[in-house]
Image (cartoon, rainbow, N blue to C red):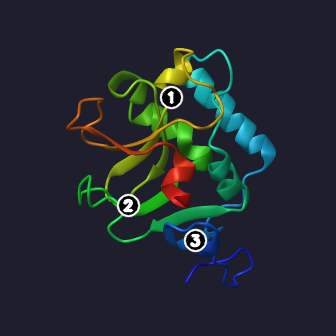
C-alpha cells in the first residue's frame, strides 16, 4: 500500500515495472519546477560546474508527483550484492545537503546522491563525464551505489547499478 496526497491510496507500480511500491507525499509537498531548477543549480555550484546539472527526467517526474520512497522488486541487485538495499528514499530538496554533509566532492568527486537505500547506502548519479564534457548534460548519467561509510570510486566501494535512472526503474 502507498500513501497518497489526500490520504487515499495511489499506486505508480504499473508505470514503473521494477517498482513494487511507492510512498507519495507522506512528509513533503511535491516539488515545483522552481524547486527542480534550484536543485540543479545548487548541485552545479557544489560541483563547480559551468551550468546546472540536469536531473534524470524520471526523477523530476517522481519528485513533482510528490513521490518520496520507491521499493524495488526483491532481488533486484542480487548479482551485484545483497548489501544494496531495495528502497530508494528520494533526496529531492536535500540532495545538496547530503552532497556537502558526506563530503562527496572529496571522497567521491563527480557523484551526486539522489536517493538513500534504507541501509546506509546512496544511489548516485555519476556525472564525471558530464563534468569533463565527454557526455551530454541531459539527465542520463549512470547510476552507482556506495555506502556512506566507504565513499570512493574504488571497485570495492562503488558499484555500477544501471546505465541511468530510467533503466533502473523502467527496464
Query: Which of the labelled discs sits on residue 127, or is there none?
Result: 1
Image quadrant of residue 26? bottom right
User: Badge 1: few (under 14), some or many (20 or more) residues near its Cα, within 10 Å?
Assistant: many
Q: Nearer the viewer, residue 128 or 104?
A: 128
Left or right placement of residue 107 versus residue 22 in this view: left
Image quadrant of residue 78? bottom left
Q: Nearer the viewer, mark 3 or mark 1?
A: 1
The residue sitting at the front extreme is 171
Residue 125, image x and y in percent? Answer: 49, 38
Query: Which of the labelled discs sits on residue 23, or is there none?
Result: 3
Label 3's element? strand
Label 2's element? loop
Whether pointer 2 and pointer 1 mark residues with C-beta atoms closer than 8 Å, the reply is: no
User: Badge 2: few (under 14), some or many (20 or more) residues near its Cα, within 10 Å?
Assistant: some
The residue sitting at the right extreme is 33
Whether pointer 3 and pointer 1 mark residues with C-beta atoms closer than 8 Å, the reply is: no
User: Badge 3: few (under 14), some or many (20 or more) residues near its Cα, within 10 Å?
Assistant: many
**Residue 60 sits above or below residue 54 on the image:** below
Q: Residue sitting at 40 percent across and 30 percent down?
A: 104
**Residue 134 sits above or below residue 112 on the image:** above
N-terminal label among 2 and 3: 3
Quadrant (top left, top right, bottom left, bottom right) of the N terminus: bottom right
Residue 22, image x and y in percent? Answer: 56, 71
Residue 49, image x and y in percent? Answer: 60, 18
In the rendered image, which residue does mark 2 sit on?
Answer: 118
**Residue 79 sits above or below residue 74 on the image:** above
N-terminal label among 2 and 1: 2
Q: Nearer the viewer, residue 124 or 134?
A: 134
Left or right placement of residue 137 versus residue 77 in this view: right
N-terminal label among 3 and 1: 3
Amino acid at each position: 500500500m502507498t500513501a497518497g496526497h489526500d490520504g487515499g491510496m495511489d499506486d505508480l507500480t504499473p508505470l514503473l515495472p521494477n517498482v513494487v511500491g511507492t510512498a507519495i507525499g507522506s512528509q513533503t509537498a511535491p516539488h515545483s519546477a522552481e524547486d527542480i531548477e534550484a536543485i540543479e543549480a545548487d548541485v552545479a555550484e557544489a560541483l563547480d560546474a559551468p551550468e546546472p546539472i540536469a536531473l534524470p527526467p524520471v526523477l523530476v517526474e517522481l519528485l513533482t508527483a510528490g513521490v518520496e520512497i520507491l521499493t524495488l522488486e526483491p532481488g533486484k541487485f542480487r548479482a551485484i550484492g545483497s548489501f544494496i538495499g531495495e528502497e530508494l528514499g528520494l533526496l529531492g530538496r536535500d540532495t545538496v545537503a547530503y552532497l556537502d554533509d558526506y563530503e562527496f566532492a572529496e571522497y567521491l568527486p563527480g557523484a551526486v546522491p539522489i536517493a538513500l537505500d534504507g541501509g546506509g547506502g546512496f544511489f548516485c548519479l555519476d556525472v564525471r563525464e558530464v563534468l569533463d564534457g565527454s557526455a551530454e548534460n541531459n539527465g542520463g548519467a549512470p547510476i552507482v551505489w556506495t555506502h556512506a561509510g566507504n565513499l570512493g570510486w574504488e571497485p570495492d566501494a562503488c558499484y555500477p547499478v544501471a546505465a541511468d535512472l530510467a533503466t533502473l526503474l523502467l527496464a
